[in-house]
Image (cartoon, helix red, strand yellow):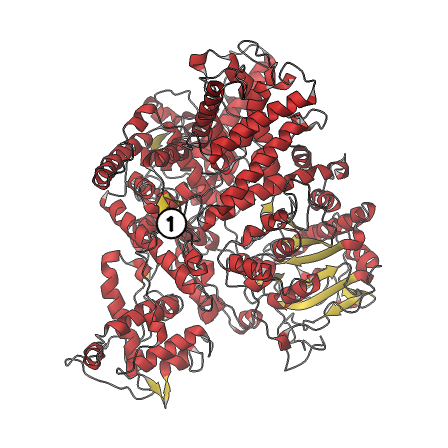
Amino acid sequence: MRRDFLKTCALTGLGLTVPTQRLSAADKNRELPPYDGPYYLVFNASGGWDTTYLMDPKGTDRINRLYSKEQILTHGNHRFAPTAQHRQKGLSNEDFYAEFGPEMLVLNGLDYSVNNHSPCSRYMATGKLDSLAYPTFAALVAACQGASCPLSFLTFGNYSATGNLVAKARVPYLPSLKRIANADSIEGNPKSPYHDDFALNRIEQALQQQHRDRAEAMSLPRRQHAENMLYAAQVNSKALNRVTPHIPNQIPKTRLAQQAEIALASFKAGVCVSANLSIGQFDSHANNDSDQMKLIPEFLEGIAYALHRAEDLQIRDKLVVIAQSEMGRTPDYNKGNGKNHWSIGSIMFLGPGIEGNRVVGKTNEKQFALPLDPKTLNTVNDEGIRVRPEHIHQSLRQFAGIANHVYSEQFPLSLKKSEQLMGLWGNPQRPE
Amino acid sequence: MTRTTVSLRSFLLTAACIFVFPVAGTALLAADPIICPTVEDMDFQRFFANELWLKVGRAECVKCHKRGGDAEDTRFVLQDLSRLVKAEHATAMQANRDAFVRMAFEQDGDQSLLLLKASGDKEHGGQEVLKRGTAGYQILQTFVRRARAPNLNPTDGSAVASDHTSLFDGIKMLEDHRLLRRATLSLAGRLPTLDELASLAQPSSRTAANAIDATTNRKALSATLDQLLTEDAFYLRLQECFNDIFLTLGVDGNPDQTVLSYEHFDKTRGWHQNFDLSHIEDEKERRDAGYKLARDYRVALLGEPMSLVEHIVRNERPFTEIVTANYIMVTPYTARGYGCFDEIQGQFNNPVDPFEYIPVRLKSLQGRRESENQDSDTGFYPHAGILSTLQYLSRYPTTETNRNRLRARMYYEHFLGVDVLELAARVSDAAAVTEKFENPTMQASECVVCHKTLDPVAGLFQNFWRFDRNSALYGKRKEGWFTDMFATGFEGDKLPQNDHWRALQWLGEQTASDPRFARTMVGHAYYLLTGRRPLLPPKDLNDPFYDEKSIAYHAQQHQIDQITTRFAASNYNFKTAIKDWVLSDFYRADGLLNPVSSPKRMATLEDIGLVRMLSPEQLERKVTAIFGKPSELLQGQAAMLYGGIDSKEVTERAVDPSGAMGAIQRTLANDVACRNVSLDFSRKKTDRILFPDIEPDAIPGESAATDKRIRDAIIHLHQHVLGRDDEEDSIEIERTFDLFAGVITDAQKSGRFDKRETWSCRQGLETPVPDPHYTVRAWRAVLTYLLRRHEFLYE
């Protein structure tokens, strides 16, 4: 019954009824229990990374000038480009694979179908090329698993559409977290509340009654939606005070680390399901190699930072990492030593429920994608599929256990069963 | 319906029509006269308009099969309705219908050529557009069948009507005085004056009187809006809105370097560094004055494009000038940067005001080297409104490989309302296409569909071909413009040779006369008022609510058409577009008159009603309007946290509150109440804003008269803070009364409490305000409660 109701709401654009639906089951004034994972971190290399300098090395003159075929490195089943000698700062591929290779799943030969930033970003983030309405995976999983968390879906950039399912939260600076953690106290000091407890309780009760009465009134869909969102945002925001103990005293210097600290503190406090982390400038139309050698190590360093901090916060075993970009770079250099847009790329995954030390899919020596047998995940010559973002998203939805959720059904990926990637996540040793 | 009627309504092929059933492979030439069956049947016409055209023709075919499109040289060329004024639509639709009917008669063997082409089977340049079996393909199939078999009864699909006239049936409209409050707060950041309210007739219960009231009130509202749209606060809002669209405040770096680049302004852009401040004796003060000078100069530079918008609207000049104005706006500070201050300083009212903008025509740019001088037949910079401002060009820079395509894309989006990238079709193997063709953008149909539109416009920006903004924006490509791009021009028209030096002016002229421009500007006016863009047509034919969404879309388009017509008739006075929207049902719709249980109806109404979460800037202005001073809690980083934009990385405003924003709303409500309740009680009664008719000694339950006074005070607060007109015995007043009384009761039950307000909330009072009965704090709780409500935080 509730499912049908939600479906109707979703279809008619009232998707955001969930926060109050959940609240109506219990005392709406009471703080919600913390969200306990899994947490999803989506790292975006915005602008288009050069996969041949990371997980899909070629080592031919035409494609890579910084290393030869013979210099390509391996770690377990992974093959990767050597970057220790070329990076300016950040983490080399060598160090990254040495530490995380055993946990990491890489998919090469991903076909983005087009090669413009805007549609590619949308496609990669949502699994749907030709719609502006679809939510990103991060937003979808947040809506399905924890819409009532105050910072359910955090975003720091990149394509962040929510499909009207959940509010997107932007908390650009660490100190901002402190500002919002104690909203009912003067200057954020918990010892100086604005109101006595009994007065605050009365205010909350009045708001609750007012919201209840309004829900029964005849309102236009937009109004219903807005009132639900507003009420949920204010009520749920009380849980933000749980973030305070996890906000670090020192603000890290690198871009991804700053974003990761905000996301991880919010995860740890149980107020966030997913976060979209992003750094830009990968669009290396000029001087590809120097740009990529600056950015890929910075990107990997950011991922490593997040994983180490998650370890410190004891949430590493619940953290799922997805690292992606909206496109790859051409298999040749232009006149400015840059590389243009290429519609073939790669994606990396790491986390509980994902069997590491694996590489799925391939590109050939000219960096064209090879078709994949979705059943065996082996590349094949003729029969097979071109792995596209919708395949990845279908698998992600299954992985997160939301493929059949009413919100996912509202945004179908329309993949035939025979085209779905079987066993992409492998057979991992799930944590106890 | 009788058989005769059916027969009469069946397809009548006119006698004058010569039937030609082309043999497969015998091509008709584009220049051949239209020899076609003219279908008179109304059902068929409706089917064409509501089904085939809406869902297939407009959505797919016309992308290429139009003048200037990739398929313009074929014999199937349609008219793009979006490029025509409304009055021409009927004729164009008939021509399109005839073109489709003619194609429906073409066969390849025993198969329909139209269907074969659409499904990509018969050397269709656009390859597979409609997959067999999809809803779109089935509509085309039905069309072909019906066109070829005129006696066929209509299918279910043809019965779908895009009847949008009933969209507002059963919708409650905002009363006039509340509409007035909505408009004054939204457009001028203030409450309506007593005179403005008095100009509106009170609602009457008599029908005839209501009709008179409506006419009178419409005139009064119109007059008030005329006044409102002259206020400075409106122009602030106008600039804010257009920056949301153009984002010109988001220019990277210091604008005195990235707008005024070294090549053309090296001698003048740094004027502030040598400005004589020696009259300031104190060194620190002198240094600070220097900083302020630089800061104001940069802010003034960034503000020029939006000041142009303001200038055009304030002076009721044709809004087409945002693409045709042969001038820019400069201030005494920015004029120094351009190097023209000495010539024009007499035109300023106050030559030391950094923010007094006046229109000026710049001389053509002179480079450090002769080769970098700007071409000009007149000796002046060929200004083309915002399009040619250095801020716009700097905000949307180009690269060697991008070839001005970003600028062309933004141009289409900003001025013609076209998202070119939405045309981007899925490519079966984009990498293979890139490899297969020597020049995919001109050869591969998947690429041509966008590039044939985009590249000619990109070419119009060719004189701004520099990549390091610090160094230069203006400059031509040494080897001449690219020949491996579609020729420079606009939608099929080539740029005349004589106009090369003024290419952007030429583009501005084409733009101003393109019907899409006026419609897009009317859409921008809608954005200003609602915070959202006009609806896009529904695309998913399998969506169970496709028809309902289509009705909503067409109703809005109909309104846009009407407003666009008046906007054009007013010589593109942008204020007419704003006024028309404010007075339209779209702005006034406020609720349902009766319960609606039908999901279909709810889907139709999904976008109806203003319901806009206030931006941080708007919310701050509302606080100021209601309390007489801002909260100062929504500035800088807090504004970003509250869904604001920085015009660079964050360019879309939040439309729904996250938990973080919910927390800020709590803080805002707590703090504004804290700062204002005691303060208001400390004022003389005549100066009070919140509590003009009550004192803190009024305790609920003392007497009926006291309770009445408390209720009246609550009614005043509801009206002043929320804009609600609640009756004394309404549930809303009762709830607030209960809150007030309940807090006092709880305080008394607690036994001991300080007889004074909290220290932070009793600062800056005009006279001391003791709180022996906890009533001041109870009123503060009431105000906090009101400030957290939808009516305050949304418009």
Secondary structure beneath disc 1? helix
Q: Nearer the viewer, residue A332 or A371?
A: A371
- Residue B364, by quadrant, is top left
- Residue B29, by quadrant, is bottom left
In the rendered image of this protein, does residue B235 appear above or below residue B647? above
Q: Within 10 Å of the Cα at label 1, are there few (<14), some (14-19), or many (20+) other Cα atoms?
A: many
Q: In this view, does A17 lie to the left or right of B58?
A: right
Q: Where is residue B729 in the image (x, y as percent from the top left)?
A: 44, 31
Q: Position of residue B568 (x, y in %)?
A: 25, 47
Q: Where is residue A368 in the image (x, y as percent from the top left)?
A: 63, 71
Q: Residue furthest toward the bottom?
A: B109
How many numbered circles does the render carry? 1
Q: Residue at position x 74%, y 38% from top?
A: A247
Q: Which residue, given by chain and number where applicable, does mark 1 sit on?
A: B415
Q: Which of A282 and A130 is in front in this view?
A: A130
In the rendered image of this protein, does residue A306 appear above or below residue B730? below
Q: Which of B563 and A77 is in front in this view?
A: B563
Whether residue B482 is visible here, answered yes or no, is: no
Whether residue B712 is visible here, answered yes or no, is: yes
Q: What residue type is labelled 1?
A: Phe
Q: Is residue B558 left or right of residue B128?
A: left
Q: Residue furthest toward the left?
A: B16
Image quadrant containing the N terminus of chain B: bottom left
In the rendered image of this protein, does residue B402 appear above or below residue A420? above
Q: Which of A326 and A191 is in front in this view?
A: A191
Q: Where is residue B783 in the image (x, y as percent from the top left)?
A: 53, 27
Image quadrant containing the C terminus of chain B: top left
Q: Which chain carries label 1?
A: B
